[in-house]
Amino acid sequence: MTGYRNLKLSVGQALTGVSVVTGIAGLLLLSVSHVSASESSAQSVPDTYLPELVQIPAGELAVTDPDPRSTQGGDAEARRVVFEQPFLIGKFEITFEQWDHRYRAGGCEHSPNDKGWGRADHPVINVSWDDVVQYLDWLSAATGERYRLPTEDEWEYAARAGGEPPAEAPPLFTDEALAWAADYSLAPRQSKKTKPVGSGDGNPFGLFGTRDNVWEWTDSCWQQTYKTDKGPVFRKNCGVRVLQGEHRSYMPSFVRGTSTGGCSIAPLPGNFGFRVVRES
């Protein structure tokens, strides 16, 4: 027993001269390991699954609220929106391939149904606003970049690409009491199925699918300004978000049906997807 104790002391004394060097080397090794781990974390999403982005130049547009209830029959006044800096937005909608990678990585709880229309390069659909926020939080944490939804004005500016707004279709209902129904009606088209992202021609800014594939969630809350005898009355509800795409519309932020889990509000007509903005 005594011999073993002396052996431990001898080994300890022999290593005393190199303990400082070992300590410094260890700190350097830990430092390098920390940097490598950080870099690995910031690159944990393969390029295949990252959103492809285009830069939208600075500029401005005039926006008129298309909802007649906001003006109570009066003329809508255009709102001037200025974008002083360029911003980055998704060239395409987020696809099932990108969403499914995140699902396999354990970054979400919801695996949306594609209705048999196709996954892979088709835009992800049947996702609520809350689902999208969860995806964006995961993507931001995994890449070290800040991803978010575009505001309704950012989306509209990028979709117009410096041009005039598309011509409005004739109203489906002349009764103002049925205006809400017109908000959720789809214009007739050849197929209700989604198309792969990148189908057709892009707009002058290089965006695809802004008018003919899916409705897209934005970060903007529903709001209205009513004119009254006592002045304008402003209403805002962030439990309802603005959708862009087929036309501008409003939708409760959580619209996933019970068949796909988590909510008692069934999806209304149309298919809801999204594209992202990355903050520089």
Image (spheres, helix red, strand yellow):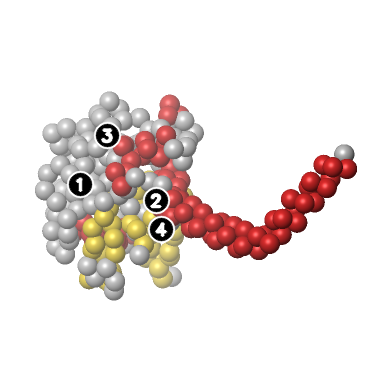
Question: Is 234 left or right of 56, judged from the image as shown?
Answer: right
Q: Can residue 177 be seen?
A: no
Answer few, some or many: residues within 10 Å of disc 1's Cα (few below 14, many 20 plus, some between 14 and 19): many
Give the distance between the C-alpha atoms of the residues marked 1 and 4, in whole angstroms: 23 Å
Q: Which residue is mark 4?
A: 146
**Amino acid type at image mark 2:** Gln
Answer few, some or many: residues within 10 Å of disc 2's Cα (few below 14, many 20 plus, some between 14 and 19): few
Q: Quadrant of the N terminus?
A: top right
**Amino acid type at image mark 4:** Arg
**Residue 39: mark:** none
Give the distance between the C-alpha atoms of the residues marked 3 and 4, in whole angstroms: 25 Å
- Percent coordinates x, y for residue 103 in the rendering: 42, 36
Placement of 167 over or under 130, stated as above or below? below
Task: Name which of mark 2 and mark 1 comes first in the sequence.
Answer: 2
- Percent coordinates x, y for residue 240 in the rendering: 42, 50
Q: How many marks?
A: 4
Q: Pointer 1 and pointer 4: residues touching (CB < 8 Å)?
A: no
Task: Name which of mark 1 and mark 3 comes first in the sequence.
Answer: 3
Give the distance between the C-alpha atoms of the residues marked 2 and 1, in whole angstroms: 28 Å
Q: Which residue is mark 3?
A: 120
Give the distance between the C-alpha atoms of the residues marked 1 and 3, in whole angstroms: 16 Å
**Amino acid type at image mark 1:** Gly
**Amino acid type at image mark 3:** Ala
Secondary element at image label 2: loop
Secondary element at image label 3: loop
Which of discs 2 and 1 lies nearer the camera? The answer is 2
Residue drawn at (38%, 55%), measured in percent from left and top? Answer: 147
Furthest residue toward right: 2
Give the distance between the C-alpha atoms of the residues marked 2 and 4, in whole angstroms: 14 Å
**Residue 209: mark:** 1
Placement of 233 over or under 94, stated as above or below? below
